[in-house]
Amino acid sequence: MKLREHEAMKIFGEHGIPVPKGFLIHSPAELGPRMGELGDRFVLKAQVEVGGRGKSGGILVANPSNGARLAEELFKKEIKGVPIREVLAVEYLDIQKEYYASIAIDRSTKQALILFTDQGGVDIEILAKENPDAVRKASLPLLMRDIPPFMLRDLLGSSPKEIGSILNQLFRVFCAKDALLAEINPLVATPHGIFAADAKLIIDDNALSRQGITLNRDLTEREREAEKHGFSYVELNGDIGVIGNGAGLTMATLDLIEYYDGKAANFLDVGGGADQERVMHAVKLVAADPSVKVIVVNLLGGITRCDEVARGIISAGVVQPIIVRLAGTNEAEGRQILDGSGYRMMESMEQAVKAAVEAVQ
Ligand code: GDP
Ligand code: MN
Protein backbone atom coordinates (compact mmCIF):
# COMPACT_ATOMS: atom_id res chain seq x y z
CA MET A 1 0.00 0.00 0.00
CA LYS A 2 1.26 3.41 -0.93
CA LEU A 3 1.42 5.85 1.94
CA ARG A 4 0.53 9.49 1.43
CA GLU A 5 3.35 11.99 1.37
CA HIS A 6 2.58 13.38 4.84
CA GLU A 7 2.55 9.88 6.34
CA ALA A 8 5.83 8.94 4.67
CA MET A 9 7.37 12.27 5.67
CA LYS A 10 6.42 11.71 9.29
CA ILE A 11 8.08 8.29 9.22
CA PHE A 12 11.17 9.65 7.48
CA GLY A 13 11.38 12.40 10.10
CA GLU A 14 11.06 9.90 12.95
CA HIS A 15 14.01 8.02 11.49
CA GLY A 16 16.18 11.10 11.46
CA ILE A 17 15.84 12.19 7.85
CA PRO A 18 15.56 15.99 7.77
CA VAL A 19 12.11 16.98 6.48
CA PRO A 20 10.55 20.44 6.17
CA LYS A 21 8.43 21.60 9.12
CA GLY A 22 4.73 21.66 8.47
CA PHE A 23 1.27 20.30 9.15
CA LEU A 24 -1.69 18.65 7.44
CA ILE A 25 -4.94 20.51 6.79
CA HIS A 26 -8.31 19.08 5.80
CA SER A 27 -9.91 22.36 4.74
CA PRO A 28 -8.67 25.83 3.71
CA ALA A 29 -9.98 27.25 7.00
CA GLU A 30 -7.45 25.20 9.00
CA LEU A 31 -4.53 27.02 7.40
CA GLY A 32 -5.14 30.58 8.69
CA PRO A 33 -4.68 30.04 12.43
CA ARG A 34 -1.44 28.08 11.91
CA MET A 35 0.07 30.02 9.01
CA GLY A 36 2.48 31.73 11.40
CA GLU A 37 4.32 28.42 11.96
CA LEU A 38 5.43 28.35 8.34
CA GLY A 39 7.40 31.57 7.90
CA ASP A 40 7.14 34.08 5.10
CA ARG A 41 7.06 31.53 2.32
CA PHE A 42 5.57 28.05 2.30
CA VAL A 43 4.40 25.27 0.00
CA LEU A 44 0.90 23.78 -0.21
CA LYS A 45 1.02 20.17 -1.38
CA ALA A 46 -2.06 18.18 -2.42
CA GLN A 47 -2.08 14.77 -0.72
CA VAL A 48 -3.19 12.60 -3.60
CA GLU A 49 -1.74 9.26 -4.56
CA VAL A 50 -0.92 10.18 -8.15
CA GLY A 51 2.50 10.76 -9.61
CA GLY A 52 3.61 14.08 -11.03
CA ARG A 53 1.59 16.27 -8.69
CA GLY A 54 3.88 19.19 -9.27
CA LYS A 55 3.33 19.18 -13.01
CA SER A 56 -0.43 18.79 -12.56
CA GLY A 57 -0.76 21.90 -10.38
CA GLY A 58 -0.94 20.08 -7.06
CA ILE A 59 1.95 22.04 -5.53
CA LEU A 60 1.65 25.76 -4.88
CA VAL A 61 4.20 28.14 -3.39
CA ALA A 62 2.41 30.59 -1.10
CA ASN A 63 3.00 33.39 1.40
CA PRO A 64 0.95 34.71 4.31
CA SER A 65 -0.91 37.23 2.14
CA ASN A 66 -2.03 34.84 -0.63
CA GLY A 67 -1.98 31.56 1.37
CA ALA A 68 -5.67 31.52 2.26
CA ARG A 69 -6.72 32.14 -1.35
CA LEU A 70 -4.32 29.52 -2.77
CA ALA A 71 -5.50 26.95 -0.22
CA GLU A 72 -9.12 27.64 -1.29
CA GLU A 73 -8.10 27.13 -4.93
CA LEU A 74 -6.15 23.96 -4.24
CA PHE A 75 -8.98 22.25 -2.35
CA LYS A 76 -11.29 22.90 -5.33
CA LYS A 77 -8.90 21.21 -7.77
CA GLU A 78 -8.70 17.63 -8.93
CA ILE A 79 -5.38 16.01 -9.79
CA LYS A 80 -5.82 13.55 -12.65
CA GLY A 81 -9.45 13.11 -11.61
CA VAL A 82 -8.67 12.62 -7.92
CA PRO A 83 -10.28 15.17 -5.57
CA ILE A 84 -8.05 16.85 -2.99
CA ARG A 85 -9.17 16.19 0.59
CA GLU A 86 -5.91 16.86 2.42
CA VAL A 87 -3.16 19.39 1.89
CA LEU A 88 0.27 19.35 3.46
CA ALA A 89 1.51 22.82 4.31
CA VAL A 90 5.29 22.93 4.69
CA GLU A 91 7.93 25.60 5.00
CA TYR A 92 9.49 26.63 1.71
CA LEU A 93 12.86 25.07 0.98
CA ASP A 94 15.36 27.29 -0.77
CA ILE A 95 16.57 24.66 -3.22
CA GLN A 96 20.15 24.92 -4.50
CA LYS A 97 20.41 21.43 -5.92
CA GLU A 98 18.12 18.46 -6.34
CA TYR A 99 19.13 14.82 -5.85
CA TYR A 100 17.24 11.57 -6.16
CA ALA A 101 17.46 8.64 -3.74
CA SER A 102 15.45 5.46 -3.61
CA ILE A 103 15.58 1.96 -2.22
CA ALA A 104 13.54 -0.82 -3.76
CA ILE A 105 13.49 -4.59 -3.79
CA ASP A 106 15.59 -6.14 -6.54
CA ARG A 107 13.68 -9.34 -7.17
CA SER A 108 16.46 -10.98 -9.17
CA THR A 109 19.09 -10.68 -6.42
CA LYS A 110 16.59 -10.65 -3.51
CA GLN A 111 18.39 -7.61 -2.16
CA ALA A 112 17.73 -3.96 -1.59
CA LEU A 113 18.52 -1.91 -4.68
CA ILE A 114 19.74 1.57 -3.85
CA LEU A 115 19.59 4.23 -6.55
CA PHE A 116 21.14 7.67 -6.23
CA THR A 117 21.77 10.50 -8.61
CA ASP A 118 22.87 14.09 -8.22
CA GLN A 119 20.62 14.98 -11.14
CA GLY A 120 17.35 14.87 -9.26
CA GLY A 121 14.14 16.80 -9.81
CA VAL A 122 13.56 15.13 -13.18
CA ASP A 123 11.76 11.96 -14.14
CA ILE A 124 14.12 9.25 -12.96
CA GLU A 125 12.87 6.87 -15.67
CA ILE A 126 13.82 9.38 -18.37
CA LEU A 127 17.22 10.09 -16.81
CA ALA A 128 17.96 6.38 -16.51
CA LYS A 129 17.26 5.98 -20.22
CA GLU A 130 19.01 9.07 -21.52
CA ASN A 131 21.94 9.22 -19.15
CA PRO A 132 22.22 5.83 -17.45
CA ASP A 133 25.68 6.59 -16.03
CA ALA A 134 24.23 9.43 -13.99
CA VAL A 135 22.19 6.97 -11.91
CA ARG A 136 24.39 5.09 -9.46
CA LYS A 137 23.25 1.74 -8.16
CA ALA A 138 24.15 -0.57 -5.31
CA SER A 139 22.72 -3.87 -4.11
CA LEU A 140 22.58 -4.64 -0.43
CA PRO A 141 21.40 -7.72 1.50
CA LEU A 142 18.37 -6.86 3.65
CA LEU A 143 20.08 -8.32 6.71
CA MET A 144 22.65 -5.52 6.74
CA ARG A 145 22.23 -2.80 9.32
CA ASP A 146 24.06 -0.09 7.44
CA ILE A 147 25.20 0.62 3.94
CA PRO A 148 28.95 -0.12 4.00
CA PRO A 149 31.18 2.96 3.61
CA PHE A 150 32.74 1.78 0.33
CA MET A 151 29.26 1.42 -1.16
CA LEU A 152 28.25 4.88 0.04
CA ARG A 153 31.38 6.36 -1.55
CA ASP A 154 30.50 4.74 -4.88
CA LEU A 155 26.91 5.92 -4.68
CA LEU A 156 27.64 9.48 -3.65
CA GLY A 157 30.68 10.33 -5.73
CA SER A 158 31.37 13.98 -4.98
CA SER A 159 27.93 14.67 -3.44
CA PRO A 160 27.81 15.98 0.15
CA LYS A 161 28.75 13.39 2.77
CA GLU A 162 25.67 14.08 4.91
CA ILE A 163 23.60 12.45 2.16
CA GLY A 164 25.35 9.21 3.16
CA SER A 165 23.71 9.22 6.56
CA ILE A 166 20.37 10.06 4.97
CA LEU A 167 20.73 7.03 2.69
CA ASN A 168 21.46 4.91 5.75
CA GLN A 169 18.37 6.26 7.51
CA LEU A 170 16.34 5.61 4.38
CA PHE A 171 17.62 2.03 4.38
CA ARG A 172 16.54 1.61 8.02
CA VAL A 173 13.07 2.98 7.18
CA PHE A 174 12.94 0.60 4.24
CA CYS A 175 13.68 -2.44 6.41
CA ALA A 176 11.68 -1.38 9.47
CA LYS A 177 8.55 -0.61 7.46
CA ASP A 178 8.63 -3.73 5.26
CA ALA A 179 8.76 -1.40 2.28
CA LEU A 180 8.82 -2.28 -1.39
CA LEU A 181 9.94 1.25 -2.18
CA ALA A 182 11.29 4.15 -0.17
CA GLU A 183 11.97 7.16 -2.35
CA ILE A 184 13.02 10.78 -1.93
CA ASN A 185 12.55 12.77 -5.12
CA PRO A 186 13.83 15.36 -4.80
CA LEU A 187 16.31 15.24 -1.97
CA VAL A 188 17.43 18.85 -1.88
CA ALA A 189 20.40 20.90 -0.80
CA THR A 190 19.48 24.21 0.84
CA PRO A 191 21.53 26.83 2.71
CA HIS A 192 20.30 25.09 5.89
CA GLY A 193 21.36 21.59 4.86
CA ILE A 194 19.90 18.63 3.04
CA PHE A 195 16.15 17.91 3.21
CA ALA A 196 13.69 15.39 1.83
CA ALA A 197 11.36 17.67 -0.15
CA ASP A 198 9.13 14.75 -1.10
CA ALA A 199 8.56 11.34 0.49
CA LYS A 200 7.25 8.13 -0.96
CA LEU A 201 6.84 4.84 0.85
CA ILE A 202 5.13 1.71 -0.43
CA ILE A 203 4.51 -0.99 2.17
CA ASP A 204 4.40 -4.63 1.14
CA ASP A 205 0.73 -5.65 1.27
CA ASN A 206 1.74 -8.93 2.92
CA ALA A 207 3.21 -6.98 5.85
CA LEU A 208 0.28 -4.63 6.48
CA SER A 209 -0.94 -6.37 9.63
CA ARG A 210 2.60 -6.47 11.04
CA GLN A 211 2.78 -2.72 10.33
CA GLY A 212 -0.49 -2.15 12.19
CA ILE A 213 -2.35 -1.14 9.03
CA THR A 214 -5.86 -2.61 9.10
CA LEU A 215 -7.27 -1.14 5.90
CA ASN A 216 -5.49 -1.41 2.56
CA ARG A 217 -6.52 1.86 0.92
CA ASP A 218 -5.14 0.78 -2.45
CA LEU A 219 -7.79 -1.92 -2.86
CA THR A 220 -11.08 -1.26 -4.59
CA GLU A 221 -14.27 -2.08 -2.72
CA ARG A 222 -14.55 -5.29 -4.75
CA GLU A 223 -10.95 -6.26 -4.00
CA ARG A 224 -11.62 -5.77 -0.30
CA GLU A 225 -14.77 -7.88 -0.52
CA ALA A 226 -12.73 -10.59 -2.24
CA GLU A 227 -10.11 -10.48 0.50
CA LYS A 228 -12.88 -10.97 3.08
CA HIS A 229 -14.00 -14.14 1.32
CA GLY A 230 -10.44 -15.37 0.87
CA PHE A 231 -10.61 -15.16 -2.94
CA SER A 232 -7.58 -14.23 -5.00
CA TYR A 233 -9.03 -11.44 -7.12
CA VAL A 234 -7.35 -9.03 -9.48
CA GLU A 235 -8.87 -6.32 -11.68
CA LEU A 236 -7.63 -5.81 -15.23
CA ASN A 237 -8.70 -3.61 -18.14
CA GLY A 238 -10.80 -5.81 -20.43
CA ASP A 239 -14.43 -6.91 -20.50
CA ILE A 240 -14.45 -10.64 -19.71
CA GLY A 241 -14.89 -11.75 -16.10
CA VAL A 242 -12.96 -14.90 -15.18
CA ILE A 243 -13.62 -17.38 -12.39
CA GLY A 244 -11.39 -20.40 -11.93
CA ASN A 245 -10.19 -22.68 -9.17
CA GLY A 246 -6.49 -22.91 -8.54
CA ALA A 247 -3.88 -20.44 -9.75
CA GLY A 248 -2.83 -22.68 -12.65
CA LEU A 249 -6.27 -23.15 -14.16
CA THR A 250 -7.13 -19.49 -13.64
CA MET A 251 -3.92 -18.33 -15.33
CA ALA A 252 -4.42 -20.82 -18.16
CA THR A 253 -7.89 -19.35 -18.70
CA LEU A 254 -6.39 -15.87 -18.89
CA ASP A 255 -3.77 -17.08 -21.36
CA LEU A 256 -6.48 -18.57 -23.56
CA ILE A 257 -8.45 -15.33 -23.51
CA GLU A 258 -5.32 -13.55 -24.67
CA TYR A 259 -4.76 -16.27 -27.30
CA TYR A 260 -8.23 -15.72 -28.76
CA ASP A 261 -7.66 -11.93 -28.76
CA GLY A 262 -9.95 -11.24 -25.85
CA LYS A 263 -9.30 -9.08 -22.81
CA ALA A 264 -10.05 -10.10 -19.23
CA ALA A 265 -11.75 -7.53 -16.99
CA ASN A 266 -10.70 -9.38 -13.87
CA PHE A 267 -10.01 -12.83 -12.55
CA LEU A 268 -11.02 -14.60 -9.39
CA ASP A 269 -9.62 -17.82 -7.98
CA VAL A 270 -12.24 -19.39 -5.70
CA GLY A 271 -9.66 -21.78 -4.27
CA GLY A 272 -10.27 -25.41 -3.36
CA GLY A 273 -13.51 -27.01 -2.22
CA ALA A 274 -15.81 -24.15 -3.20
CA ASP A 275 -19.44 -24.80 -2.26
CA GLN A 276 -22.63 -23.26 -3.65
CA GLU A 277 -22.47 -20.18 -1.48
CA ARG A 278 -18.82 -19.47 -2.22
CA VAL A 279 -19.42 -19.80 -5.95
CA MET A 280 -22.41 -17.48 -5.67
CA HIS A 281 -20.33 -14.82 -3.92
CA ALA A 282 -17.60 -15.23 -6.53
CA VAL A 283 -20.00 -14.78 -9.45
CA LYS A 284 -21.69 -11.78 -7.83
CA LEU A 285 -18.35 -10.16 -7.13
CA VAL A 286 -16.99 -10.61 -10.63
CA ALA A 287 -20.29 -9.43 -12.12
CA ALA A 288 -20.27 -6.31 -9.94
CA ASP A 289 -17.39 -4.92 -11.99
CA PRO A 290 -19.21 -2.64 -14.46
CA SER A 291 -16.76 -3.42 -17.26
CA VAL A 292 -17.66 -7.14 -17.22
CA LYS A 293 -19.86 -8.01 -20.23
CA VAL A 294 -19.58 -11.79 -20.06
CA ILE A 295 -18.28 -14.24 -17.44
CA VAL A 296 -16.29 -17.42 -18.01
CA VAL A 297 -16.45 -19.95 -15.19
CA ASN A 298 -13.77 -22.57 -15.61
CA LEU A 299 -13.73 -25.00 -12.70
CA LEU A 300 -12.31 -28.40 -12.13
CA GLY A 301 -14.35 -30.58 -9.82
CA GLY A 302 -12.18 -32.42 -7.35
CA ILE A 303 -13.24 -31.74 -3.80
CA THR A 304 -15.32 -29.06 -5.48
CA ARG A 305 -18.52 -30.63 -6.78
CA CYS A 306 -19.86 -29.52 -10.13
CA ASP A 307 -23.51 -29.64 -8.98
CA GLU A 308 -22.69 -27.26 -6.11
CA VAL A 309 -20.96 -24.96 -8.57
CA ALA A 310 -23.93 -25.05 -10.92
CA ARG A 311 -26.33 -24.13 -8.12
CA GLY A 312 -24.00 -21.34 -7.03
CA ILE A 313 -23.90 -19.90 -10.54
CA ILE A 314 -27.66 -19.95 -10.81
CA SER A 315 -28.32 -18.52 -7.36
CA ALA A 316 -26.05 -15.53 -8.10
CA GLY A 317 -28.65 -14.42 -10.65
CA VAL A 318 -26.44 -11.87 -12.39
CA VAL A 319 -27.40 -10.08 -15.60
CA GLN A 320 -24.30 -10.90 -17.66
CA PRO A 321 -24.21 -14.13 -19.69
CA ILE A 322 -22.14 -16.85 -18.03
CA ILE A 323 -20.26 -19.42 -20.06
CA VAL A 324 -19.38 -22.45 -18.02
CA ARG A 325 -16.83 -25.20 -18.32
CA LEU A 326 -17.05 -27.76 -15.54
CA ALA A 327 -15.17 -31.04 -15.39
CA GLY A 328 -14.79 -33.68 -12.73
CA THR A 329 -16.83 -34.70 -9.70
CA ASN A 330 -20.60 -34.73 -10.36
CA GLU A 331 -20.10 -33.22 -13.80
CA ALA A 332 -23.28 -34.79 -15.22
CA GLU A 333 -25.43 -33.42 -12.39
CA GLY A 334 -23.88 -30.01 -12.86
CA ARG A 335 -24.63 -30.07 -16.56
CA GLN A 336 -28.21 -31.06 -15.93
CA ILE A 337 -28.76 -28.24 -13.46
CA LEU A 338 -27.25 -25.65 -15.78
CA ASP A 339 -29.07 -26.93 -18.87
CA GLY A 340 -32.34 -26.67 -17.01
CA SER A 341 -31.69 -23.01 -16.29
CA GLY A 342 -30.49 -21.96 -19.72
CA TYR A 343 -26.76 -21.67 -19.04
CA ARG A 344 -24.20 -22.68 -21.62
CA MET A 345 -21.94 -25.47 -20.51
CA MET A 346 -19.04 -26.11 -22.84
CA GLU A 347 -17.08 -29.30 -23.37
CA SER A 348 -13.63 -27.75 -23.15
CA MET A 349 -12.01 -24.61 -21.82
CA GLU A 350 -11.00 -23.65 -25.37
CA GLN A 351 -14.65 -23.69 -26.41
CA ALA A 352 -15.73 -21.78 -23.33
CA VAL A 353 -13.13 -19.05 -23.77
CA LYS A 354 -13.78 -18.79 -27.52
CA ALA A 355 -17.50 -18.40 -26.87
CA ALA A 356 -16.83 -15.68 -24.31
CA VAL A 357 -14.53 -13.75 -26.64
CA GLU A 358 -17.12 -14.03 -29.45
CA ALA A 359 -19.86 -12.88 -27.06
CA VAL A 360 -18.15 -9.56 -26.38
CA GLN A 361 -17.13 -8.88 -29.97
P1 GDP B 1 5.68 15.37 -7.04
O1 GDP B 1 5.42 16.20 -8.26
O2 GDP B 1 4.46 14.64 -6.61
O3 GDP B 1 6.87 14.49 -7.16
O4 GDP B 1 5.95 16.41 -5.85
P2 GDP B 1 7.29 16.99 -5.19
O5 GDP B 1 7.05 17.14 -3.74
O6 GDP B 1 8.47 16.20 -5.59
O7 GDP B 1 7.40 18.42 -5.82
C1 GDP B 1 7.58 18.64 -7.20
C2 GDP B 1 8.60 19.74 -7.42
O8 GDP B 1 8.18 20.94 -6.80
C3 GDP B 1 9.95 19.43 -6.79
O9 GDP B 1 10.75 18.66 -7.65
C4 GDP B 1 10.51 20.80 -6.54
O10 GDP B 1 11.17 21.26 -7.72
C5 GDP B 1 9.28 21.64 -6.31
N1 GDP B 1 9.15 21.89 -4.87
C6 GDP B 1 8.48 21.17 -3.95
N2 GDP B 1 8.64 21.69 -2.70
C7 GDP B 1 9.45 22.76 -2.86
C8 GDP B 1 10.01 23.73 -1.97
O11 GDP B 1 9.81 23.72 -0.76
N3 GDP B 1 10.80 24.70 -2.53
C9 GDP B 1 11.03 24.77 -3.87
N4 GDP B 1 11.83 25.70 -4.34
N5 GDP B 1 10.54 23.88 -4.73
C10 GDP B 1 9.75 22.90 -4.25
MN1 MN C 1 8.55 14.13 -6.15
Image (spheres, rainbow, N blue to C red):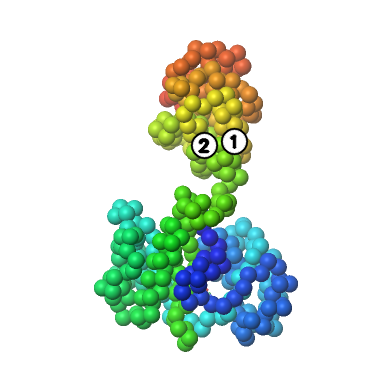
Which residue corresponds to the image point at 41% horizontal and 61% vertical from the top-left?
A: 175
Q: Amino acid at mark 2?
A: Phe
- Residue 36, label in figure: none
Q: CA distance from mark 1 to mark 2?
A: 10 Å
- Mark 2 secondary-structure assignment: loop
The answer to whether marks 1 and 2 mark residues whose Cβ atoms lie closer than 8 Å is yes
Q: Residues within 10 Å of mark 2 (few under 14, many from 20)?
A: many
- Look at the image and tell me whether residue 183 can be seen: yes
Q: Is residue 340 above or below residue 184?
A: above
278 displayed left or right of 329: right
Quadrant location of residue 157? bottom left
Find disc 2 in the rendering and name its residue: 231
Q: Amino acid at mark 1?
A: Leu
Q: Nearer the viewer, residue 356 or 324?
A: 324
Q: Residues within 10 Å of mark 1 (few under 14, many from 20)?
A: some
Q: Is residue 77 above or below residue 120?
A: above
129 displayed left or right of 218: left
Find disc 1 in the rendering and name its residue: 285
Decide if ligand 1 comes within 8 Å of the CB at mark 1: no
Which residue corresponds to the image point at 61% horizontal and 45% vertical from the top-left?
A: 221
- Mark 1 secondary-structure assignment: helix
**Whole-percent x, y for residue 28 in the image:** 71, 71
Decide if ligand 1 comes within 8 Å of the CB at mark 2: no
- Look at the image and tell me whether residue 260 can be seen: no
Which residue corresponds to the image point at 59% horizontal and 35% vertical from the top-left?
A: 285
37 displayed left or right of 188: right
**Whole-percent x, y for residue 215 in the image:** 58, 51
**Whole-percent x, y for residue 293 in the image:** 58, 33
Q: Nearer the viewer, residue 313 or 275?
A: 275
Q: Nearer the viewer, residue 15 or 361?
A: 15
Quadrant location of residue 6? bottom right
Q: Which callout, 1 or 2, points at the residue further toward the start of the chain?
A: 2
